[in-house]
Amino acid sequence: MDASEIEFLAEKEHVRVIPNFSQDKIYLISGDLGPFSAGLPVSIPLWLAVNLKQRQKCRILPPDWMDIDGLKDKKQEEADSRFFTDMPSPFYMEITQLLLQCATDDIPGADEVRTLIKDIWDLRLAKLRSSIDVFIKSGASHAKLNHLTLLEMNTVRQFLTKALDHMHRLKLCVSGDPAVQQ
Amino acid sequence: MLIKDFRRDFYDVLQHQRVLVLVAFDVDALCACKILQYLFQCDQVLYTIVPVDGLQELEHAFLENAEGIRHVILINCGAAVDIVEMLQPEDHVRFYICDSHRPVDVHNFYNAVQVKLLMREDELSSMPAYDDLFRDDGEDESEESDSENDDPETGYKRKRFDDESIIRRQDRRRWNESRVKTLFDYSKFTSYGTSAALMMFELAWKLSKDTNSLLWLAIVGVTDQFVHYRTPRDKYMEDIMSLQSHVSRHNQRGADDENIMSVNCLRVSFEEELYLPLYRHWKLFDSICHSMPIACKLRLWSLKGQKRLHEFLAEMGLPLTQCKQQYSAMDTAMRSEVKVKILEYMNKYGLEIQDVIIPSFTMQYGYKHLLCATDFVYAAAAALESVDRLRLPTDNFLAATEILQRCVSRKIEAGLESAKLQLRGVVNQVQSFLDMHQIISAGPFLYVCVQEGTADSRFFSHPQCLLRLARYTLQAHCSVSRNKRVRSLPLVLGAPLSIEEGRSIMVGIPPLDTDDERKNFFGKAFEQAAESTNTVVRFNSFDSHIIEMKTEDRSKFFDALISILQ
């Protein structure tokens, strides 16, 4: 899977905006959107929110979890716990990236939010790498990780699967299995 | 015809249509074009942008691109010529002219169907009345033909000599004479109205689509008009005051702690800026030497003037070593004091507050870029008129557009560097004019020519730089000359355009006395001089006081000009 595909999936998440135009419901294959009334908040998918923002047709309200104190607590929780904690949204990284790119002026404390999310991301990736390390060294045959998001998995997916595959083949060679050619 | 409601009669008409936008080659037009482009992108209107730097290119661009287009927008070009007559469009084509050149051609104003003007109503108040210019001559002609039909045998026309037709003929002759006179009076003086960028910003504001970046573009457009001496200081102050209300509206956040803005947002703030060109990106000493008001008042061409400058700096307490290094490398304590110190000591050296301080805006984007509006204008103008001969004009246009988009900081820095070279070229040229006494007083005006083949002459083949040089020269000459009358004399400046073809470019600017109005009469004067001497003069530019001609015709032309203006 590609990071851009994951971003595409993330854009289906709903976010609240305040439009400055009025329009009736829009009927799309994936669901109904609207109706839009100027000045009243409405919940729409992220892809539409970004497009409307770029065309100056709405104001984006930051998601509930995107505030500085909440994120600070989350970061502390992540640092204290040995395992992965539950993230406020399965696509927290992508949503933050998209919103901070197009709607920086709508999100209060945008710089601080960006730094905190990056810190949480780094913590989780560090945990992931060290847990993979432990897994391989212990030679176990399976492991279970909770609360990993799709983007984090994607960073290790390709390398990890190929590396495990190679190691499996090398082990078979060492154990002298005649079924294995080389 | 003048448009009263921009939104309904201009913008709504363009929805879901294909539009052709023709843009002139100056920074104000560029800013207006970018604002319009942003609005079109918001509302998904298909557009084509073509930069044009003269009337010929305008015609050419129109012919090439006009298939299937019903709406043509002209930015900073085309108001002063009869556009329908010149381009011969089809009947369904509509022109929308947003131009700061005045006076507007009478045919453009009175054409209610095909031409719409995007201008402020109060600026067009001096337009002569419809009845003075156009008259229904149908009935007079039919009377004449009736009288001719009375003599079919004789076969030739015979004028009737009864009282009625004599009176009618006299009337018509008188009306024609008054028409010619009215037109001449109306188009005698050229001047400039509100900046095109400001008009476009007001449109965006009415559509509630104005943002900080559009506001910044409007500021740059207005500053461009001031930097190139198109509008008087009063008009500039008015525009700045109206923009200030918008600036405070967009930029009020960031003061309180709960609502901190990200550093990566554009922030615009009002400031009483020092009128030293590019001083933040240059050495303070160089910036002061190249600042026109200070250089002229202190007379920095003479040795005495240089000494006075050193005295001024010493008295302010700024050590020379600090002044001669890059501004960003100066001591922070000293940097913050520069403005205060200059204001304290300027009166002693004959400087006034309007030579030194100009109200303007600065913008900050990210940690690196603190730029003021004049920096932008200089950088973009230098990019538009780049001296690199290998680049096409459209490349220059695109480079200047990128500077205005401020995403690519490399381009801004390159633009600032070329602006510094241009400024140095201008100052060196003025110095050589004064040293070699090349400014000749030819009776009703002053006259000077840039020598061919000097290193700096390549900068002056472009009109905007040439205008700045002309103004600098006039001001310098007035400060140096002992003749009191020299302040009321206009200046005509010639520069080589291309040495191989033997062509040169001439520009005429009004005298310093009329600085409050900045009305230029050289358009008509050049026309009449060209007619009387039968010289081949190319009136290609949108400004009628900038012309091109052959170098050998120059002296003939000047003699004719002297006799006309006397």
Image (tube, grey):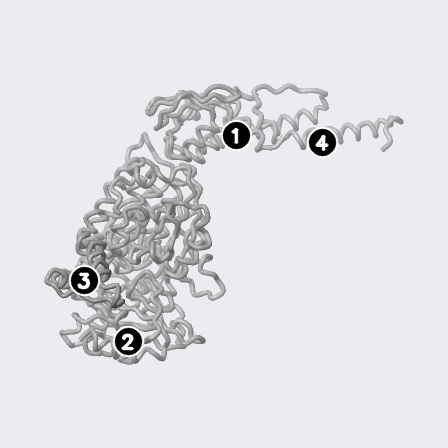
Q: Is residue B115 visible?
A: yes
The three-letter amino acid code for the residue at tag 1 is Trp
Q: Which residue is mark 1?
A: A121
Q: Position of residue B369 (x, y in %)?
A: 38, 49
Disc 3 crowd, CA 10 A, few/some/many (<14, 14-19, 20+): some
**In the displayed structure, would residue B244 be above or below residue B140?**
above
On screen, residue A11 versus residue B167, left or right, reads right
The three-letter amino acid code for the residue at tag 2 is Val
Dot placed on the residue nearer the N-terminal end, 2 or 3: 3
Label for residue A162?
A: 4
Name the residue: 47% across, 19% down. Answer: A32
> The numbered mark 3 sits on a residue in which chain?
B
Circles 2 and 3 in contact, beta carbons < 8 Å: no
On screen, residue B506 versus residue B411, left or right, reads left
- Are callouts 2 and 4 both on one chain? no
Distance in Å between CA atoms under marks 4 and 3: 93 Å
